[in-house]
Amino acid sequence: MADLVKELISGVVDSVLKEILKTAARKATSAKPKPPRKQVSKRRTAAGRSRQRRR
């Protein structure tokens, strides 16, 4: 009977430890989100200007 209880407890502890390790690994691998890119006004190139002129 004691063996059965011991087996049950060790099984539960094992599964809990595995879960904790999984979540810790997931947190370590997830990279920090990149900050949003700053909006830069685009300079018109010569090709862009001539395209606009054609319209």
Image: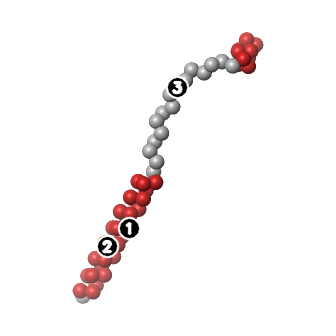
Q: Mark 1 to mark 3: distance in Å? A: 44 Å
User: Is 47 on the left-hand or right-hand side of 9?
Assistant: right
> Residue 22 sits in which quadrant?
bottom left
* Residue 44 picture location, percent across and down: 66, 18
> Closer to the observer: label 2 or label 1?
1
* Residue 7 picture location, percent across and down: 31, 81
Helix or strand or loop: what does disc 2 sit on?
A: helix
Mark 1 near mark 3, Cβ–Cβ under 8 Å? Answer: no
Residue 17, compared with residue 24, is above or below; it is below
Look at 31% across and 72% down and name the residue there. Answer: 13
- Dot 1 or dot 3, earlier in sequence: 1
Disc 3 target residue: 39
Amino acid at pointer 2: Val
> Residue 41 sits in which quadrant?
top right
Q: Mark 2 to mark 3: distance in Å? A: 52 Å
Disc 2 target residue: 12
Disc 1 target residue: 18
Residue 26, compared with residue 36, is above or below; it is below
